[in-house]
Image (tube, helix red, strand yellow):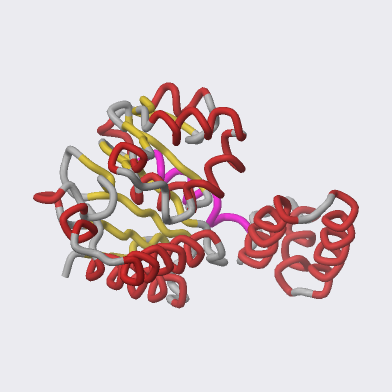
Amino acid sequence: MFIKTKVEKLIGYLIIDRPESLNAMNNQVLDELTMKINELISNSDVRVIIISGAGDKAFIAGADIKLMQGMNRNEAFDFAKKGHRLTNLIENSNKPIIAAVNGYAFGGGSELALSCHIRIASEDAIFAQPEVKIGLLPGWGGTQRLPRIVGKGIANEIILTGMNISAERAYEIGLVNKVVKKDNLISYCNKIAGDIIRNSPNAINESIKLINMSSNKDLESGLKIEAKRFSDLFETDETSEGLTAFVQKRPPKY
């Protein structure tokens, strides 16, 4: 097994544990990741998920190149679709997923981070989409998610040059939410998770759906859906509890 998980204080921790290969992803790792993320999403004791990579050198150093070298066209297509299923699962999770990025986040590792709702990087993190250097292009969502996050111009520069992006530069272009010291990476992610956990799960779930939808809807259509989802929440116990707790000046119980 290459994936380790644990649950503490409503946080699900998922660690890609293949440090001898810089946590590179092959079919087995992809299958295990998908299975374990599904388990954490389904776990009622989990409200937030944090994904990290084992070892000091890498978050995920991309897909396993040796595996890809022997692929034919059909196998490559299936491999890309498997990566899409994983990244879509993460992006559409009703529970926020935080990427705790230490060291290399190359290729598929960067693309996995892009699908997370929040990205926190250690000072030594390095991002890259280097696929063009080996005659390929990003195949797990990089050409689609990266422009939505950093803009078309910067995405072109990153993908067409295959350049390395430092943690500081990643923060400047909006690729990551925060850069922290390496020793503080998980503790800072825990703090964000704790801030999220204090809030209404229903409201968080609906917010994730609407934010994801925003890139595919015109403003008027998005606003109509927002108004509908906003008003629907008034029929839920969580919203009733939140409003009552605010008036009574006490923490809500979700």
Residue at 25%, 64% in the rendered image: 71
Residue 105: within the magenta? no
Task: Give whichever of 228, 152 is nearer the camera.
Answer: 152
Q: In which image quadrant can residue 160 be found? A: top left
Residue at 41%, 74% in the rendered image: 38
Q: Position of residue 110 (x, y in %)?
A: 38, 44
Task: Give whichever of 152, 181 is nearer the camera.
Answer: 152
Q: Position of residue 9 (x, y in %)?
A: 39, 61
156 relative position to 180: left or right: right
Task: Give whichever of 140, 18 is nearer the camera.
Answer: 140
254 relative position to 74: left or right: right
- Judge whether residue 186 can be spotted in this image: no
Task: Give the magenta range.
Answer: 186-199
> The N terminus is located in which quarter?
bottom left
> The C terminus is located in which quarter?
bottom right
Q: Position of residue 224 (x, y in %)?
A: 89, 60
